[in-house]
Every structure is written in C-alpha cells, then in structure tokens.
Amino acid sequence: MAVMDAPLPRARASSRWAKDKGLLGWLTTVDHKRLGILYLYTTFFFFLIGGIMALLVRIQLAEPQNKFLTPSQYNQIFTMHGTTMIFLWIIPVFAGFGNYLVPLMIGARDMAFPRINALSYWLIPLGGMTMYAGFLFGGTGDAGWTGYVPLTEKQYSPSVGQDLWILGLHTLGISSMLGGINFLVTLHNMRAKGMTWFRLPLFCWAQEVTQGLVVLASPFLAGALLMVLLDRQAGATFFAVNHGGNALLYQLIFWFYSHPAVYIMVLPAFGIISEVIPVFARKPIFGYRAMAYSMSAIAVLGFIVFVHHMFVTGLPVYVQTFFSATSMIIGVPTGVKIFNWAATLWGGSIRYDTPMLYAVGFLLLFLVGGVDGVYLGSLAVDYSLHGTYWVVGHIHYVLFGGSVFGVFAGIYYWFPKMTGRFLNEFLGKLQFWVMFIGMNLAFMPMHVLGLLGMPRRISTYADEKGWGNWNSVVTMGAFLIAAAVAIFLINFFISLKAPRNAPADPWEGDTLEWATTSPPVKHNFDVIPEVRSSRPVRDMRRAARKVTA
Amino acid sequence: MILATGPLPIAFDDSSPLHPAGPVDEHIQHVYTPVFWASVALFVFVAGLIIYASLRFRRKSDDEEPEQIHGNNRLEIAWTIVPFLILFSLFIVTAVNMNFITQAPDGALKVCVLGQRFSWSYFYNTDCGAAVQVKGGENGGTKLGYTNILGKRAVSTLKVPAGRPIALEVVSADVNHSFYLPTLGGQINAIPNQLNHMWFQADKTGKYYGQCTELCGDNHYAMEIVVEAVPGDQFQAFLATVDTNSARTGSGAGGQ
C-alpha cells in the first residue's frame, strides 16, 4: 500500500526534477502538479470559449424572430457550447484538480503512471482542436452534444465537421479513460502509511468513485461514437433504418454512458465541497462514512436510471415505470449528502472566505437542481416537460450551480497552495455575488419557459408564443455570469503579481496537501507524513500546539 | 383553484401544460401538482436549514473551537428514510396515472402521424403499420417514401372532433422528431421504422398548438403542430372530403 514512505533527501529529489525548466520543461513535464496546472489552464480556456458560444446563443434568443444567427450557425454554436462545457471544461477541469491534489492528499510523490498522465493531458487540446477545426471546413458538428442518429448519419449531416466532432470526442474519451485508470491505480496503491480507506479525504473518495465511473462507462460512449463513424465513413448500417439498422439503439448505448457522465461531472464537486465546508466551519464532516457510501450508491444507481432520458421514445410502459422509480430513488443518497453538509454547518464556527461562499452557494443551487430533477424523473410529468427549457434549466442548476460553483470554491481554496499567493478576497466576493445573481436570472426563468412549452434547441420563435420577455431575462443573466467571469480573470491576473505570502496551511486545513509548502516542493514532501486519522494536518497542528504550551 | 391557474403566480398562456385542455394532460397535472407541492416543501425546509445554519453559526472569535460532532446515526437514518418515503409516494402517484395516460380508450379515432423534416402529415383511420415496412434501396437508400406506401391523402392541420379520444400512431420519415401537445397530452418521439403511440382528447373546440421538441436539423424551430378541434358533425363532413379525394402521390405536405 504505502510504497513510498522512505524519506527522500531534498538534494537528490530536486535533481530528479531539475530538468523541468522553462517552456520546454512545461511541454515535457510529467510532474502531476504541472500537469494539473496545464489541465486547469487549458480547461479554463475552453470554459471561456464555451462561454462565448453561450453568449452568442443568448443574443440570438433574446428576442423573438431574431436574425443574429442563421439556424445552421445556431445549431453549430449550441452544439459546440454543450460539447465544450461538458467534455473540455467540467470533466477535465476536475481531472486537473485531481491530478494536482490526489497525490498530495494521499501523501504520494506523483501519480502512478506519470507519462500516461502527460498523454491524457495532451489528448485534451488535441481533441478540442479537432472538434473546433470544423469551423475551418464549412462548419462544426451541429446535432447537439447528444449527437443522436439518424440526424448524425451522413445523409442528414454530410459535413466533415460532424466527423471531426466524433473524432475529437473520441480523443477526449481516450484521455478520460487513461486518466481514470491512472487515478484508480494511484488511489489504490500509493496512499501514505496509515491512510486507510476511511481516512481518505472525501475529495479523493469522490475521485475514486468518479474515475471508476469513467473507466466503466466511457467505453460505451466510445462504442456509440465508433458505430456512427463506421456508418458515416465505412458503409456500416448499425443505425441505418432502411438497411435494417435501429435508430433507437444509439440512444440506449449513449445514455448508458451519459447518465453516469452526469455524476462524473458532479461527484468531484461534491468532493471539493466536502473539503471546504468542514475546514471553514471548523468541524469534521458530518457522517463521513455516509458521505463515502452515498457517493458509491449514487455511482451504482447512476447506471440504472439512464432510461429517463428516453421516456418519450416509446419504450414499453413497464420499463419506463421501473426507470422512473430508480430515477426518483437516486434522489435519496443525494439528499443524504445535502443534509450531511447542512449538519456540518450546524453548530460550527463558520468563516466566510470566498471558498466558503461558493460552497454554501453550491448547496443552495444544487438543491434547486436536485428538486427540479424530480419533475423529470416522474414519468407522467416528464411527458409534458421532456425536451423543453425545463430540462435546460435543470441541467444548468446541476452543472453550473453545482459543478462550476464547486470549481470556483476549489480555485479560491487551493490557489494559495498552487501559487503561494492569495486571490483577492474583495474581488472574489464580488464575483460570487454577481455570479450567484446572474446564474439565477439566467436559469430560473428557463423553468418558466419550459412550463410555457418552449422546446429546447430552437433557433428562434414567434412573438405570439409569449416567450420573449422571459428569454430577455435569461440573456441578461447570461451576461451577468460573463461579467462575473471577467471579474475572476482580473482577480487572477492581479493576484499572480501579489506577494508570495501564503503559508503552508492558510485555512487551517485537515488534509495532507496543507502539510507541505505553498507551492509544494517538486517531490511534494521531504518526509511522507504518517496518517492517524482522517484529519492528519489538524492532528499535526494540535501536536505542535501541545509542544509549545 | 390550482389546476386552473397553475400553482405559480405567473399567467401561463394556452401553450402551457399547466392549462390542460383534455383528460390526458389533466392526469399529468394530477401528478404535477403533488410533485410541485412536495418539491416546494422540500426546498423551503432544506434551503431554510442551510441558510439558517450558515447565518446563525458564523465565527465570533478566532479561537473558538466548536464541538467536534462526527455524526448521528439516528438523524442520518431519518434523513435517508423520510426523503425515500416522499419520493416513493411521488413515484406511486406517477405510476397509478400511467395507465390512463398511455392507454387510448376503445373507440378512439385512429390517426397516423408522419413527421418529416420539417412538417407533420396526418392520415385518418389509418394505422402506420404499412408505412414502416421499409425496403432498402428503393429510393436509392437516401429517402423513405412513407406517403407513397400509405396511399392516403395527408393533411397538415390535425382536425379532430372535440370530445372524442384520438389515438395517434407516430412515425418518422427521416430523423427523430417529437410530437408535443403541451395542453392536450404530453409528447411522443417520432422515430423512423418504429411505431409509437399516444392519445389525447380536446374537450372543447378550438385551436391547440405545439411544436417538435427533438432537434431535427436547421428548421427544427419551424416544425409547428396545429390541432383544430371542431364539432363532431363538422368533422364528419371534413373527413368525407379527405376520403373522396383520390390517393395522392408524392410526399406529404412540406416534404422534401
């Protein structure tokens, strides 16, 4: 288990990493921390691109009969918005946090397979560029992030952009799977002495469960995409109905991946929140084991709810009813987590630095995303809300209010560790409030639009539909979110010039990354600390206090 | 009255499922309403808990150390079981309504609905069964000729008799579509080579609107659905004009 617990003399350790200098050092690095930072930069870049796509979509929809984008441009842009945010931002940004933090949190010197780690990183810009190359060849994929057949079959989407979209996504899938295996091996074999499974930080638990899902589910996406590609390019007929293929088959395979993928996108945020809340409330997480078990339960149940994405495809009612039951029941472990976070706050001594603001914001927004999901899990209600803006509102409360708020909590929390500098607190709080208000303005009215019968993915709508005013509000909210991101960028660039005054343990943390310097030395720890509880750094602080007293 | 206005203080117009115009959507509302109130109650309770705790337990002095509580089995069991019971009862409410929502009553008027980019065609007293006998290569393998196979005249507005159940068979001639009637009866996908079913009944005469809810290409936004409910005798007269017309060849209205 703990294979690297021997002290490593600093001089020898530094010489091993001495080659990591300059640009070439960054390009050839296999250090998990540098790769983690490359992940974070790259994915944030794609977040900005995906955000620009979202703004273009919102400008087009701001008023009825708008002609800002043609329907064809609109379809490409919303397709690239969804694909970018899911596959080039949320999934890999958490891989970035995991890369940087998992070895530090478990007391290891690197990931298990550093070179494979570098490969999984470099596949991300490659996959992203492949997808976006469509803009140079007459248009990108334009069938939505779900890429349903028959729409993506060659006769309906002849553009090479659709092939590039498939190839890019395929590349990103390979990156995820390689990374997933790497994380699992690291977590299973490289924990420091004394770090048992139930002393493992919940962030690492979240990574364990997430990466398990990645390894088990992603091959199904790869399979579905490959079948479409073969249909398009090699004359295969998996989904070609007039040659005996089946159009619905794609959805079954796709959602067998893509529902677990929702948890791939949100479990790591659970992990971040479970680190931030106890530290800023000065309490241990309430119900540690329940937190670990509920994540595992979500992962297992996550494989048997996927048919709720197909409630209106005409599957037999008894099949749908079964999946309606599981879809409602998966709310239970999610509820357990929310209650446990609330109970961690209860009776605590809460300090509101920016990471904590984002964590509490996460709780409230994710709660909305959980509650409005119950409507869609109920088979009957889904018949009238499926494919409407209700779904768009729901997914954004989960993935923006949940995942993205989790990401920002993580950025503000670990920025001192990664850079040795603090982000500006005033700008951080300003960003939080602008983003919190903006996101509710943008995504709450989407529920109303869903109840008014507005379908998703339409490029424009008639005035008489009465959707114009609500859409204007949504667009205003989207621009407020953009303003919040601009505040973050300003904060980021100002803070990179700030004095390097972050101590090793600025927040009174619990977990091992706070036991090393900020930023950590290249070999992470001079001596791998021994772990005696789930809060080893708190133990060290208390021991040190006893010595001085 | 909740069902009349919807439980939200927003004036929903006639395109909202909160304004049922027939028994199917009424039954959907029988599920929606309990889901709505349960979700409001859950949200208010939990959000209240979070907001109260996060305001009440702010740090007062830097050296206070709160009690280190690691958990409480009874509480944790309670907040596993109570949400389970709430969610499970919502599931039961859903399940008991599904039979009514999905099973068309006997004697319903049969209509075949054919979705094709970017319009809908309707064929009366026809099941689409014949239409889905797809034969490869007949159209160069690029386009399916459902309307030819059906050999009946299609109309592009779904005229129906008010107060009579309508059983739809829904199929697509090309990509996936979704036939969505928010105020009448929810939706069902139109998928090539697969017969899907839904039913609805318009209680009153008038026009009801919906549109395609499954992305089907550039003009997806323009794939409108219009249902016109007329008195029974008017409908019979209309049906006679449709039937006496000779079978039309070529694709249905708006076909490519």
Image (tube, helix red, strand yellow):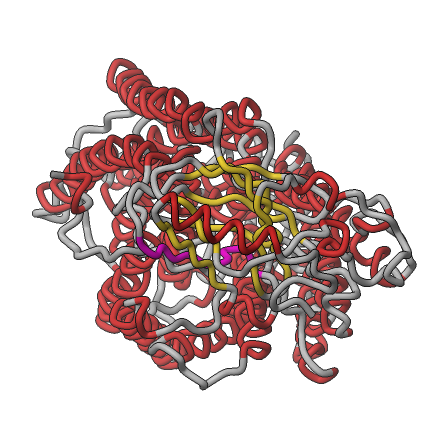
In depth, the one of A499 and B254 nearer the eye is: B254
Q: Does A442 sit left or right of A26 as displayed?
A: left
Q: Residue at x 17, y 43 (%)?
A: B4
How far across and how far down the image is residue B113, in percent?
58, 49
Residue A412 lies in quadrant:
bottom left
From the viewer's perspective, tell me whether residue A269 is left or right of residue A317. left
Residue drawn at (53%, 61%) of the image: B156
Magenta extent: B206-215
At horizontal 48% and vertical 67% (from top left) the residue drawn is: A458
Q: Main secondary structure of the magenta part?
A: strand
Residue A323: image location, x then y, percent: 52, 28
Based on the picture, tell me whether residue A540 belongs to the magenta stretch: no
Measured along the vertical axis of the image, is residue B142 above or below residue A207?
below
- Tell me which corner region of the image, top left, top right, bottom left or bottom right, holds residue A138: bottom right
Task: For residue A186, say whether it is visible.
Answer: no
**Number of callouts in the render?**
0
- Say which residue appears at 28% left-offset and 45% top-offset: B204
